[in-house]
Every structure is written in structure tokens, then in C-alpha cells.
Amino acid sequence: MGLETVPQKAKAPVPANVPADRIHYVDLYDPDGISQGYHEAWMKLQQPSIPDLIWTPYNGGHWIATRGEFIRDIYRDPAHFSSEVIWIPKEAGEKYEMVPTRLDPPEHTAYREILDKGLGLEPTKTYESKVRKIAADLVESLKGKGACDFAAEYSQVFPVQVFMSLANLPMKDVPLLQHFAFQITRPEGATPEEKAKTLEQGNDGLFAYVEPIIEARRGKTGDDLITLMVNSNINGEPLTKDKILGLIALLLLAGLDTVVNMLSFVMLFLAKNPEHVKQLRAQTPERLARSAEELIRRFPVVAEARMVAKDFQYHGVDLKRGDMVLVPTLFHGLDARENKCPMNVDFERKGKIAHTTFGDGPHRCAGMHLARMEVAVTLEEWLKRIPEFRLADGAKPVFHSGIVAAVENIPLVWTPAKS
């Protein structure tokens, strides 16, 4: 990714601790080749000639870990790689106030336990009938049309309906909340300062939205996610206002953006690969869950960061406190050192399917069980009703890179079944 291809972008000065051979010109929000695919663009950095840890002067200047081993290690080592700031550019990350994603252990642990009350494996199992009905009803409404824009009409609807139902929030609020989510995960701006301003607007918007909801549900009983978390306590004490604001805002952000985009990448792939669809149709629900995990490995969408907590040497590079390290999750699941032929989707893949699509370590995604369920249920309910489909002729999907990647414009076509 050469400097000559993007000479107009603002560049940070190169710090003294960055060797010249580690410098590569990579923009998190606009990587070279993004028009050909998000994952394809980023995988250009896993070439033998490119170091496992590189530095870019874009977005304020930061390191990028490009291999699965590094991604996994950084997630698991909060003593050296802190969650004090997790967004790039750093100026924007300092405006991000979600809890517990910006906390390190041991402070983080109690807040994570609160999230697990509503999103752990056992409570998530109780949501399946509701999740399945939402998916089935939505696909049923589409199947007779013979065509849809999957991103707009399914993936931006289904997981959002699931989340809004679990949180007991009105669907009419979704466009506003998705606007805030976009400002946070893909902030606009030509400079770190401009991106910080956009992210701050999204952060403040979410906080302003959830504040009256929190107050209305304090002291109340109910089984929705917000009521459950608002009325939790830590060491016998109720959560402080700033912490509960950050916790509920994080819940909204995660529920409205991540799975939405993963589903779009998955269905775009299947629309181009009918042989994989045929394999899925022949699978039992149990086997389908394993295949869903392979798709989750292949299509990660999150690229968080960590802040170096103290000066130390890491794999031959001197890292300084305050340095930012981007850890794109795709570099683990798509690393040939971790998975054979990683760019291929192989439903017969042997052994462990290695990935950190949901992160790792203390900050492993609290909603991963719900996300897995949503992917598997989508495959099952869609293929029951629309067993064959393809990408419409002339379709031009639009890819976005950022903290959470996205793909839009996925027109699918199929022959409606005769009634």
C-alpha cells in the first residue's frame, strides 16, 4: 500500500521508536482496494514481505498487528495492552465512553458479570424461540417477492428487531440509534480531530437517548435487558450514573451494528456460491451451527485497538506508553498460519476453527452467544423458504471499512415458490 496512491491524506510524524521498515501507509477507514472487498483489501497486509507488526502515519499514527498470534496475545494481555483507549484515531477513542469496554481488569470484571446476566450462554438459550420467530416472519414476508436488498431488508432489520425486543425499546427509534452507531464505528472527518468530533456526537447522542430510559426503569421489575442491568449492583452498591450510561449505551451500539454487518457479508458470499448453499441445505441444525462458525471465522467485521500501557519491547519493536495498536480481528481467522486455505469457506474444515471474530481475553464479546444464534437461525429459516438465490446481475456491493466494517447494496433474486 504505497504512499503514492494516497498523497492527500494527513500524516502524523514518525516517532523515534518506529523503524523505517515498519512504516506502511494504511488507512483504517479507507484501505487501498476497498471497492473490491473489505477482507480482500486488508489481506494485502499478510504478505511474506510485510512484518507482523507495522506502523502507519494515518489517523494520528498507530501500529497494526497483522497476524493471528499477535491479535490473540494483545487481546489477552491487558497489563501491556490497555483498553483505556480502544478506538482509532486516539483522539476519537478518548471521546468513546462505553463501559466496560474501556476498563481493564479487575475493575472491568464486575461490569462484565452484569452483561453476562442477560447475554451469557444460559440466558441466551431462552431467547431462541423469539429470535427464530422474528427471522421466520421476516423471511416469510420476503419470499413471495422474488427479490430483495438483503442488507436493507433483512440484515439491517432482523438483528435490530431482536435486540429492540430484548431491550423493550420501540422500533421507531431505530433510524436515530443507527445514525449514532454509524458516527461511532465509522466516524467521518479528514483529520483525527474531525473524526473525534463526529464520534463524540454519536456518543453523546446515545447517552442522551438512554438517560431517560434508565431513569424510568430504575427500581422497576422486568426481564428486558435494560431493566435487568439498570437494577444490578456491584459489591452491594448501585451503579453510578456515568457507568450505567456507558453500559446501556454499549448494549445499544453492539446490538445495532455488528451482527447486522456480519450477516450482510455472509449472505453476499452465499449469493455468489450456490454450491455452498446446497451444502447448507443438506445439513442438520447441529451441523449448520458448525457451518455458521466457519462463516463467522471467514467474515469478521471488528477492528478495535489497544493502548500500550507501559514502555516495553514487543517482538523486536520498542513500544511506548500511549502508542496505539490496531488489532483487526480478520487477521486471525484469515491467517494461513492459523487456518489452512483461510480465504476459502470450508464447511468440512477439520479440527478447531481458529478465530477471534468475537475478540478474546477479558473483553471477549458479551453478545457472542446471541450473535452465533442469529447467524445460525438466519441460515436455517432463510433456506427453508428461499432454498436457491443469487446476486442480481450487475450488482455492485459497496464496502466500508472502520471500527466495524459494513457492506451495502446486496440485491438478491430468486424464483418465488408457487402457492
Image: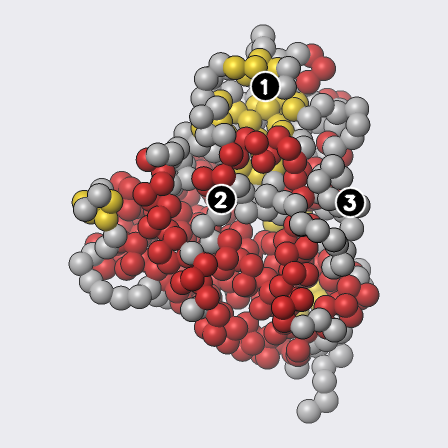
Measured as percent of width and height from the top left, residue 325 is found at 55, 27
Q: Is residue 208 visible?
A: yes
Mark 3 vs 1, N-terminal side: 1
Q: What x and y, as percent, mark residue 259?
A: 55, 55
Instruction: Establish if 255 lies above or below 131.
Output: above
Q: Secondary structure at mark 1?
A: strand
The C terminus is located in which quarter? bottom right
Q: Nearer the viewer, residue 232 or 256?
A: 232
Between residue 18 and residue 412, name the one nearer to us: 18
Amino acid type for the residue under numbered disc 2: Arg
Numbered disc 2: secondary structure = loop
Q: Please tell me which residue is depicted at 65% across the width and 24% down the height of the picture.
A: 53
In the picture, residue 65 is in which quadrant?
A: top right
**Disc nearer the start of the sequence (1/2):** 1
Q: Kindly give the residue lying farthest to the top in the view shown.
A: 16
Element marked by disc 3: loop
Name the side, left or right, on which 115 lies relative to 363.
Answer: left
Q: CA separation, marks 3 and 1?
A: 27 Å
Is residue 62 placed above or below 355 in the rendered structure? Answer: above
Residue sitting at x 45%, y 50%: 366
Q: Disc 2 marks which residue? A: 364
The label shown at residue 340 is 3
The residue located at (75%, 25%) in the rendering is 50
Label 2 Cα neighbours within 10 Å, binned few <14 / some 14-19 / many ≥20: some
Mark 1 to mark 2 CA distance (whole Å): 23 Å
Q: Which residue is mark 1?
A: 314
User: Do residues under tags 1 and 2 come within 8 Å of each other at their CB atoms?
Assistant: no
Could you say where residue 226 lies in the image, as x and y percent from the top left?
Answer: 32, 58
Q: On the rendered image, what quadrant is the N terminus found in?
A: top right
In which image quadrant can residue 95 be found? Answer: top left
